[in-house]
């Protein structure tokens, strides 16, 4: 089993001055390695077919690129599990002021409520992501290998790993659905509806 993990948003709570209204953490899960390889080729081929010169990142793609990307992976076999933290519902001062604790809490929550979907999973993280998030996630996952859910944790460069780009696009689509200030906020999440196994909204 291969699992690609990415986040969207930030740990800041000053939403009125630029912090994201929600923090989203998602796992893109491939039970089958052959399907992971096939999907990897699909994403790589799309870079050329739609003349997208850079790696796929949800927040940097134009709407028409997002449309074509999600249409292109419709027939790929993977699942998505995510946890969403709406910041207006968080009152813990510790979580509101300590980035490391913020990340650890939601990483722990995501793993705790994974519905036992992880079995001997190889976890791949984006090496270009937030350093505090990456350190917290890597440390937590490695500490829980004994449970049998996790086999290994690896950090890779999303520029060279199409399935990390897939994770970025998926978590970005879910996060966008919580942006009331954006038009067509649910547009790309709807395109993923058949892939989403669970989106748990923390309360």
Image: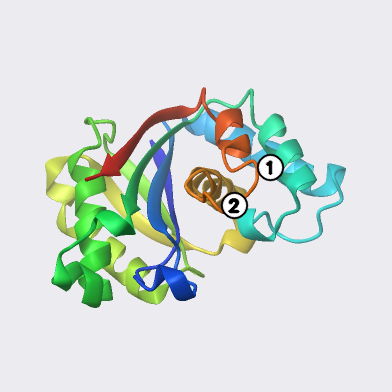
The residue tagged 2 is: 165
Is the residue marked by circle 2 packed among few (<14), some (14-19), or many (20+) residues within 10 Å? many
Question: What numbered label is drawn on residue 6?
Answer: none
**What residue is drawn where x is 51% and y is 51%?**
179
Assign a secondary structure to mark 1: helix
Q: Quadrant of the N terminus?
A: top left
Instruction: Tell me where residue 198 appears, x and y as whole percent.
Output: 35, 31
**What residue is drawn where x is 33% and y is 53%?**
86
Contact (Cβ within 8 Å) of mark 1 with mark 2: yes
Q: Quadrant of residue 103?
A: bottom left
On screen, residue 159 above or below 188: below
Q: State the colouring used for the structure image.
A: rainbow
**Marks 1/2: CA–CA distance:** 8 Å
User: In this image, 104 relative to 79: left or right?
Assistant: left
Is the residue marked by circle 1 packed among few (<14), some (14-19), or many (20+) residues within 10 Å? many
Instruction: Tell me where residue 93 appears, x and y as whole percent.
Output: 15, 72
Q: Quadrant of the C terminus?
A: top left
Q: Is residue 9 visible?
A: yes
User: In this image, 87 relative to 62: left or right?
Assistant: left
User: In this image, 36 relative to 13: left or right?
Assistant: right
Q: Nearer the viewer, residue 43 or 186?
A: 186
Q: Nearer the viewer, residue 150 or 114?
A: 114
Q: Quadrant of residue 140?
A: bottom left
Instruction: Tell me where residue 18 appears, x and y as whole percent.
Output: 49, 72
**What residue is drawn where x is 20% and y is 68%?**
95
**What residue is drawn where x is 64% and y is 41%?**
184
The residue tagged 1 is: 43
Q: Nearer the viewer, residue 4 or 189?
A: 189
Instruction: Tell me where residue 71 appears, x and y as whole percent.
Output: 70, 30
Q: Earlier in the sequence, mark 1 or mark 2?
A: 1
Q: Is residue 139 visible?
A: no
């Amino acid at each position: 089993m291969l699992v690609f993990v990415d986040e969207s948003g930030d740990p800041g709570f000053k939403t009125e001055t630029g912090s994201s209204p929600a923090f989203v953490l998602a796992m893109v899960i491939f039970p089958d390695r052959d399907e992971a390889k096939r999907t990897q080729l699909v994403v790589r081929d799309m870079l050329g077919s739609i003349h997208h010169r850079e790696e796929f990142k949800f927040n940097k793609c134009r709407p028409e690129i997002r449309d074509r990307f999600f249409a292109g992976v419709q027939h790929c076999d993977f699942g998505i599990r995510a946890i969403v933290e709406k910041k207006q519902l968080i009152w813990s001062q510790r979580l509101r002021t300590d980035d490391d604790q913020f990340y650890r809490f939601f990483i722990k929550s995501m793993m705790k409520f994974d519905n036992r979907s992880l079995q001997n999973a190889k976890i791949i993280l984006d090496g270009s992501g937030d350093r505090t998030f990456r350190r917290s996630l890597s440390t937590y996952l490695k500490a829980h290998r004994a449970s049998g859910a996790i086999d290994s944790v690896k950090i890779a460069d999303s520029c060279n790993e199409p399935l990390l780009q897939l994770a970025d696009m998926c978590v970005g689509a879910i996060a966008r659905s919580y942006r009331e200030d954006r038009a067509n906020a649910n547009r790309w999440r709807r395109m993923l509806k058949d892939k989403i196994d669970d989106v748990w909204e923390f309360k």
